[in-house]
Amino acid sequence: MTLWGTDMFDIKAELKKLPDSPGVYIMHDKADNIIYVGKAVNLKRRVSSYFQTRPRSPKIEKMISLIDHFEYIMVESEMEAFVLECNLIKENRPKYNTMLMDDKTYPFVKITLFEKYPKITLTRHHEKDGAKYYGPYTNVTALKEILKMFRKLYGYRTCNKKLDGQSVERPCLYHQVGECMGPCSGNVDPEEYRKGIDEIAGFFEGDSSSVKKNLKEKMLKCSENMEFEQAAAYRDMLQNVEELSQTQRVTAGFEMNRDVIGIALKDYKAVVQIFFIRSGKMVGREHYLLEAESDDKKEVLTEFVKQFYGGTALIPKEILLSEEIEEKELVTGWLSDVAGRKVTLTTPQKGKKEKLVELAVSNAENLLNKDAEKLLREAERTTGAIEELGELLCIEAPVRIESYDISNTAGYESVGSMVVYENGKPKKSDYRRFKIKTVEGPDDYASMREVLSRRFMRAKDQYREKDSFTKLPDLILMDGGRGQVNAALEITEKLGFNIMICGMVKDDHHRTRGLYFENEELPIDTGSECFKLITRIQDETHRFAIEYHKSLRSKGQVRSILDDIEGIGATRRRSLITHFETITAIKEADVDTLSKAPGMNIKVAQAVYDFFHGTKPPVEE
């Protein structure tokens, strides 16, 4: 038997000290990186088994060869060890644990039914706050379109105002354009408002009849009033609702919320397929690629369930599995504790449930057999590229990368962009834009210092709160070299954050040529996945900054045109742009049409018409 260890750590001697009690063990390599986390009912027996001659997977053999030292944490029970293991794996993402190669999260529809005037929002976090959550939904675009339709139809609010029915405020622009009933005005009956919310909730629970009835009534009423354009809009909405109702329905014959999970495994590569069923409807499906440490489906599926539901936003009442997982009672107890209610894990053997599981398995097998190479190439582009980047910088592979850039035109409308990549893929929900407030003129270094100060001060101030800014990056990439890196280091060090920072250096032709890190430029193999990832991040950061800058410039141009008209202030300007969408449409509108826009009257409409048709009064010199 071969044993490893440093001069300071004698593994053979430490194995003898291990207790015969439950706990979690943590394996480290020579650089003190955590490479594996496991739990054990008996620490001595489990940890000692790694250093005995026995057949294992190539991945585990490689892991064992890298073990330099280990540590362990004793606990009172197997359940405590289970929970601690899940938390440590989630926190440290050890290289040799079975890990999801794509950490996806999907949005939920949140309705704050506990409020007098409930609001509806999208969120990726499921909390025990009294609100009603529907989802997750994998087709985010379609979901946003449905909510946009409901907003026009019911006028529900999305603001964060605390409405108690006592304090009265002036309604915002959404009320003026007909997309909010304006409960903040104090003139909206709570029961009437709640009626619309209940119809929306009913839709997400599987009953679309009320929504369809409402749309048909509005469509017919507009048609009778010869408002054919609006009637056509309601007709299109009705068609969208009917199509969604038909495609969502799962012929499962049951209404309980449940997830259906099937696994396919081959050559230590696994694909897990999940169907998300909510109130009898399939609201989405997704697959996950895993690099397994075992060729046993039960073991791999057990690790997946622990990892997936340890970080997911919602645990359904029932989870249907294609394999009977290990430690079923322990996992069930843990899931029930996390969910705050009973959760059932079932491996169906007959009936409709078995058919659903078989469908999930066949989907997983199809992906693994037909798209295995594609999935592996995708893994190389993402997790593989991150590992290459870690090796280049001699650091642990960075899971979360943040990249920053500044954009302006001769110092006008300076903006900053923050782009986030996690596990080698863009995480657009965490992107942020900054309008520079304290810097005048084209000073990119000062602008970057402002952006980073605001970003990391937010992290410092809200570190204990659930905010995307509290999640710190493993690596910061600056669009530039020494100057930008030093500006970033100045801020992070001043605020007490120890974060790796390097610059993305371009050549004379504005192409990425290398990374500036720790006072030297590191060349990158232009054919490597690492180089391609860096290039993608740099291009995306630049695009995001330019896009924001262009939008501000565009708004400035609109503002300069309309603000020259007497009677047009900020509110009417926004109302006109929202109603007509373009300046050309405003120019072409007659006085009567202009007067019907929200917030307008005949006098101001005449002033707008005169301005664009050459009859405006002369400017006094």
Image (cartoon, rainbow, N blue to C red):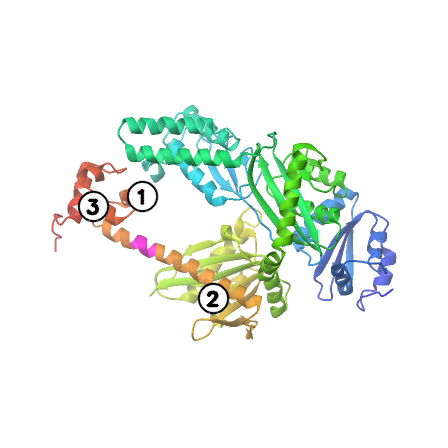
Dot 1 crowding, Cα within 10 Å, few <14, some 14–19, many 20+: some
Q: Which residue is mark 3?
A: 588
Residue 248 vs residue 64, the one in the foreground: 248
Instruction: Pick whichever of labels 2 and 3 is earlier in the sequence.
Output: 2
Dot 2 crowding, Cα within 10 Å, few <14, some 14–19, many 20+: many
* Residue 554 covered by magenta stretch: yes
Q: Position of residue 358 (x, y in %)?
A: 66, 40
Q: Nearer the viewer, mark 1 or mark 3?
A: 3
Q: What stretch of residues is rendered in magenta?
A: 552-556
Q: CA distance from mark 1 to mark 3?
A: 16 Å
Q: Which residue is mark 1?
A: 578
Residue 234: quadrant of the picture: top left
* Residue 351 covered by magenta stretch: no
Evaluate if marks 2 and 1 touch, with contact meaning CB atoms under 8 Å apart.
Answer: no
The disc labelled 1 sits on which kind of residue? Thr
Q: Secondary structure at mark 1?
A: helix
Q: Position of residue 595 (x, y in %)?
A: 21, 37
Q: Which residue is mark 2?
A: 479
Q: CA distance from mark 2 to mark 3?
A: 44 Å
Instruction: Pick whichever of labels 1 and 3 is earlier in the sequence.
Output: 1
Say if residue 6 shows up in the picture: yes
Q: Position of residue 218 (x, y in %)?
A: 35, 28
The disc labelled 2 sits on which kind of residue? Asp
The disc at residue 506 is none
Q: CA distance from mark 2 to mark 1?
A: 35 Å
Residue 350 vs residue 514, the one in the foreground: 350
Left or right of 461? Residue 165 is left
Say if residue 416 shows up in the picture: no
Instruction: Pick whichever of labels 2 and 1 is earlier in the sequence.
Output: 2
